[in-house]
Image (tube, rainbow, N blue to C red):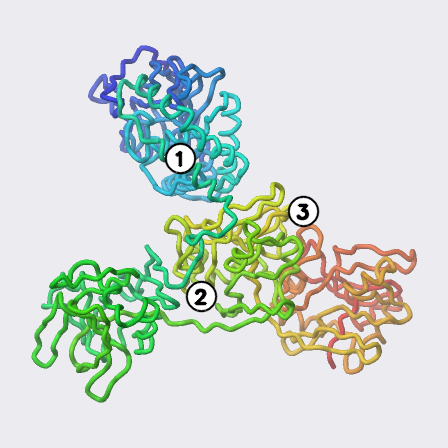
């Protein structure tokens, strides 16, 4: 291992240390960023930078450790240097690495921004960077908070280093309530002005607050560790402490002390405007404690959905889209080239700005899949949504480009442009700047069709008709997906439902009140908008009859149906209500709302507007269960796991198989039945009391849930009229119908109740329960939660009979034989 310590290298400060560059001793040296012909190798570099909390003091040790960019494993290359002065500047000369990724570490005392004094204990900070594109490397609190997250994203989630850096930096800033994005953290400095530097200094100040160096280290470790694992920082208690401190700091003169100390250390007055960021942190946090839902947190129809786009797969062009009322419109004129379409004055430049002009026949064929030429009724709906036809033009026209002071206010981001018209008979163009004309799909007569006209001289929109052979603009409207409805008979609430792929989902969050369910901030108004937040145990009982909490497989089937998990978040999120430009396109009318979370242990709410979290029925372990997460900052959907005691949203999915019923005339009990393939099975275990039948642990409560356990002789006579105990061949037919014996257990087992993560997906609503067994010889019970055992009618020999076994630890179904005198479950099959 090569180690070079440079104690006396001179690094010049320019102004407020705006640039720190290392000196070169010879022509064959390069500054940081030099690369040899072998890609990824950096050699003969002089690396310079700043080590800042406040500035680290002279003599603090700086280490540069080589890291494999693909695996994040350390190499055996390490170089060390020192901080040269109390301004925090450091330099390391002649570094050589076999890969361009390097972890910088500074350890030492630092100057406290508030007191101006040296810290009582040493502090260690890190910065993980790629030297192939950097000239200086600064080490600071933001680089500290991100570096472990970057390593996890690369090593565990197999992201590229560049993508991991972008994601980690976005997550760190979002965790701190900062919505802007800046240059890489290792390019920021508390000595320079700029938004990124303001965020850095504000973060340093907030983390420090009134803590000593030891408590600061503990706080930073906790924040960094949380972000490293999940990309989030959920410690509301610490956030509240910081926000309370921030609210009081300005009046205590602390901000002025920070500014004076930094000016003294840097020799410049160019100190970042950090105060507003700190104050906003306090204001944002205190706003979370309001009892009434703010208007800005209510997703409403009629609000513009900014920064949303759709891509026409035919030619790859991307268009802005906007939600107005309950409709989704293209917010730009269509520019798809087909026969019967024209660029104004035959200029592609006009098409790029104004879109193409289409004959009516071409317009009816022009919209991309999933979109269509609007009807006159749909234009009328648009007018109503923007306040009426008499002012619709003013509100829909763009704010520039119209002649004679005819610009609009574009209140709804429709941005109608005056693209003019093409006269087909005489083949000439006119009225650019004066008229926006949009074809409807409705014809007036054989020669004319209806269209919407917006004119520079009018505030009203007009519905007119025109010659079909002339060319006008096209605005496509998204196809409406047909909602179904679900009325919850328990409380009478009605929910929209939507079919996506072969699944039917609730298109709204469940709002059924039960124990361990919560309204965000304990406000019924939030529940009315966002639904309730349920603990996992309660979520498993929450769905109405014939609906259930989805499995992870059902969530994955949803992702596949909307085009894949990598874009599922964008397509499933609602078009309004998400923070930081995180609205979705809601292509499938799933309308996922960012309802946040309830933290049960500390009893507080967080992340409204940032996260939509939906419980699955599948548990991860005794403490955690799996859930689907949609985040404001991502287009993808994530399957994660979380503490079962916290509260998340519920979206129920309709049971795949419609149940029938069987009423046993002998005792009046009614059982669900289900058709699988060509067979009709009981979907519950038989609970008919007869000799040689038993309730687990002799408890009728167990029988009510799991049915009775029968000896084989009793089982042969137990099924009601027109139903029978199945043969082994009939069980095999069942296995074939669900995809084969090797996965039959997974698909037939219930989604809850099994030990050791042994729950099934219950794809066919068979709902096999692990009812255990009764041992006749010892007269005892065992294996509840572990085994489901179903007698067949086939005798193996005089002592044993054949049965089907489903086990918590296996996905396959097993055909075994067992002592006839022991007790097992029964599933009857219709004759």
- Asked if 748 appears above or below 176 in the picture, the reply is below
Mark closest to the chain's N terminus, 1 or 2: 1
- Asked if 519 appears above or below 242 in the picture, the reply is below
Extreme residue toward the front, this view: 251
**What residue is shown with label 3?**
622
From the top left corner, tell me how far across and down residue 728 is, in percent: 74, 71
**What residue is shown with label 1?**
279
- Residue at 46% across, 32% down: 73
- 1 or 3: mark nearer the eye: 1
**What residue is shown with label 2?**
589
In the rendered structure, are the residues bearing label 2 and label 3 in contact, judged by CB atoms less than 8 Å apart?
no
Tell me if mark 3 has few (under 14), some (14-19) or many (20+) residues whose alpha carbon lies within 10 angstroms of its own: few
Task: Identify the secondary structure beneath mark 1.
Answer: helix
The reply, left or right, for residue 714 in relation to residue 211 is right
Location of residue 490 (image quadrant)? bottom right
- Residue at 51% across, 36% down: 240
In three-dimensional space, the C-alpha distance between marks 1 and 2, rounded to whole angstroms, equals 38 Å
In the rendered structure, are the residues bearing label 1 and label 2 in contact, judged by CB atoms less than 8 Å apart?
no
């Amino acid at each position: 291992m090569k180690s070079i310590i440079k104690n006396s290298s001179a690094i010049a400060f320019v102004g407020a240390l705006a640039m720190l560059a290392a000196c070169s001793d010879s022509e064959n040296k390069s500054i940081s960023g030099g690369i040899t012909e072998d890609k990824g190798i950096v050699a003969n570099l002089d690396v310079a930078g700043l080590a800042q909390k406040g500035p680290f003091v002279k003599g603090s040790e700086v280490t540069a450790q080589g890291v494999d960019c693909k695996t994040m494993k350390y190499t055996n290359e390490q170089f060390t240097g020192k901080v040269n002065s109390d301004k925090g500047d450091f330099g390391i000369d002649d570094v050589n690495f076999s890969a361009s990724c390097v972890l910088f570490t500074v350890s030492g005392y630092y100057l406290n921004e508030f007191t101006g004094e040296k810290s009582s204990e040493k502090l260690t900070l890190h910065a993980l960077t790629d030297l192939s594109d950097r000239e200086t490397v600064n080490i600071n609190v933001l680089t500290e908070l991100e570096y472990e997250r970057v390593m996890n994203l690369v090593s565990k989630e197999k992201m590229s280093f560049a993508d991991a850096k972008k994601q980690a930096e976005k997550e760190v800033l979002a965790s701190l309530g900062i919505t802007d994005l800046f240059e890489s953290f290792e390019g920021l400095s508390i000595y320079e002005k700029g938004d990124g530097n303001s965020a850095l200094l504000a973060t340093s100040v907030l983390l420090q607050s009134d803590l000593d160096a030891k408590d600061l280290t503990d706080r930073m470790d906790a924040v960094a560790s949380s972000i490293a694992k999940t990309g989030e920082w959920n410690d509301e208690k610490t956030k509240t402490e910081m926000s309370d401190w921030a609210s009081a700091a300005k009046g205590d003169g602390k901000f002025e002390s920070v500014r004076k100390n930094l000016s003294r250390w840097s020799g410049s007055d160019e100190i970042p405007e950090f105060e507003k960021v700190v104050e906003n942190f306090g204001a944002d946090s205190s706003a979370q404690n309001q009892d009434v839902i703010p208007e800005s947190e209510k997703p409403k129809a009629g609000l513009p959905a900014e920064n949303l786009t759709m891509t026409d797969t035919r030619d790859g062009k991307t268009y802005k889209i906007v939600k107005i009322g309950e409709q989704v419109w293209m917010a730009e004129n269509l520019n798809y080239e087909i026969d019967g379409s024209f660029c104004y004055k035959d200029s592609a430049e006009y098409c790029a700005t104004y879109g193409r002009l289409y004959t009516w026949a071409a317009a009816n064929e022009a919209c991309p899949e999933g979109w269509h030429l609007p009807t006159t009724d749909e234009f009328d709906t648009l007018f109503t949504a923007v306040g009426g036809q008499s002012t619709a033009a003013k509100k829909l026209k763009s704010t520039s480009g119209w002649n004679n002071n005819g610009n609009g206010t574009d209140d709804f981001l429709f941005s109608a442009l005056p693209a003019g018209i093409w006269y087909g008979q005489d083949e000439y163009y006119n009225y650019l700047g004066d008229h926006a004309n949009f074809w409807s799909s409705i014809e007036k007569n054989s020669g004319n069709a209806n269209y919407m006209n917006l004119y520079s001289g009018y505030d009203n929109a007009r519905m007119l008709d025109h010659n079909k052979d002339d060319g006008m603009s096209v605005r496509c409207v998204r196809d409406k997906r047909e909602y179904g409805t679900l009325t919850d008979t328990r409380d009478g609430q009605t929910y929209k439902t939507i079919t996506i792929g072969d699944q039917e989902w609730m298109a709204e969050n469940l709002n059924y009140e039960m124990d361990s369910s919560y309204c965000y901030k304990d406000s019924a108004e939030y529940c009315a908008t966002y639904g309730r937040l349920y603990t996992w145990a309660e979520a498993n009982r929450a769905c109405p009859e014939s609906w259930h909490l989805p499995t992870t497989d059902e969530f994955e089937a949803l992702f596949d149906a909307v085009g894949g998990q990598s874009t599922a978040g964008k397509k499933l999120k609602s078009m309004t209500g998400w923070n930081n430009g995180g609205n979705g396109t809601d292509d499938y009318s799933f309308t996922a709302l960012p309802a946040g979370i309830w933290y049960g242990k500390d009893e507080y709410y967080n992340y409204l507007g940032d996260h939509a979290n939906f419980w699955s029925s599948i548990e991860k372990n005794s403490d955690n269960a799996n859930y689907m997460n949609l985040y404001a900052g991502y287009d993808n959907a994530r399957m994660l796991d979380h503490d079962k005691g916290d509260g998340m949203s519920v979206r129920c999915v309709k049971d795949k198989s419609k149940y029938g019923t069987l009423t046993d005339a002998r005792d009046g009990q009614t059982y669900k039945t289900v058709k699988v393939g060509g067979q009709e099975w009981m979907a519950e275990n038989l609970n008919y009391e007869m000799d040689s039948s038993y309730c687990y642990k002799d408890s009728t409560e167990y029988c009510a849930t799991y049915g009775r356990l029968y000896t084989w002789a009793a089982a042969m006579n137990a099924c009601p009229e027109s139903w029978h105990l199945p043969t082994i061949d009939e069980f095999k037919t069942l296995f074939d119908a669900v995809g084969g014996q090797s996965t039959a257990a997974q698909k037939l087992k219930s989604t809850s109740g099994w030990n050791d993560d042994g729950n099934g997906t219950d794809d066919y609503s068979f709902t096999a329960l692990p009812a255990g067994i009764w041992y006749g010889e010892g007269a005892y019970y065992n294996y509840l939660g572990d085994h489901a055992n179903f007698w067949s009618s086939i005798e193996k020999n005089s002592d044993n009979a054949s049965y089907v076994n489903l086990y918590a630890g296996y996905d396959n179904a097993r055909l075994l034989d067992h002592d006839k005198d022991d007790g097992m479950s029964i599933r009857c099959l219709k004759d």
